[in-house]
Amino acid sequence: DFEEASTAIRNIREGVSQNGVTLTDATLKTLKSVIEHLKPRVGGLIPSTVNEYNRILSKESESGSSEALTRMLAERTINKRSTEWIEENGICMDNIRPGESTIPNASRGAIAKRYMEKG
């Protein structure tokens, strides 16, 4: 999703520069809406305003990396938490793994790696 969103943003940039169009919030909102209709998760990563769009592109230019845009889009979705918050609210997940359930017709789920008490 992040890579597809980066490609969409780059395509918007190329389309704007090749056609001499001025990108407005309304135009960007329309493009975002179309992308969200086709691929909701990708569309949700597209910036909503021209200021946000320009800020993202300027950071990509500063880094000089083609992967920077993808990384920036991913980082925008992360709620950064303090160590204190993690210690108070975090849950250790090292005792489960994804896999097929042994329960009939249950499909896939979180499978215990070791014994866990019920509850």
Image (cartoon, rainbow, N blue to C red):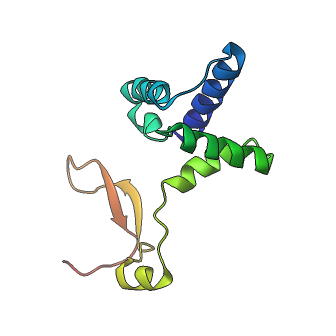
Q: Is residue 57 left or right of residue 50?
A: right
Q: Residue furthest right?
A: 64
In the rendered view, tell whether residue 85 sits above or below residue 14: below
Q: Quadrant of residue 14?
A: top right
Please provide percent x and percent y for residue 19. 67, 13
Q: Residue at x 49, y 29 (%)?
A: 28
Q: Residue furthest top?
A: 19
Q: Considering depth in this image, is 13 or 3 the residue closer to the camera?
A: 13
Q: Position of residue 48 (x, y in %)?
A: 46, 39
Q: Residue at x 39, y 77 (%)?
A: 90
In the image: residue 112, left or right of residue 31: left
- Residue 85: image location, x then y, percent: 41, 81
Q: Is residue 56 above or below residue 20?
A: below
User: Where 7 falls versus 20 (above or below)?
Assistant: below
| Left or right of 72 in this view: 114 | left
In the displayed structure image, the side of residue 105 where residue 34 appears, left or right: right
Q: Is residue 84 above or below residue 1?
A: below
Percent x, y for residue 59? 70, 49
In depth, the one of 87 and 12 nearer the eye is 12
Q: Quadrant of the C terminus?
A: bottom left
Q: Residue at x 56, y 33 (%)?
A: 4
Residue at the location (49% across, 68% down)? Answer: 80
Is 13 in front, or is 8? Answer: 13
How many numbered badges does the structure rendering display? 0
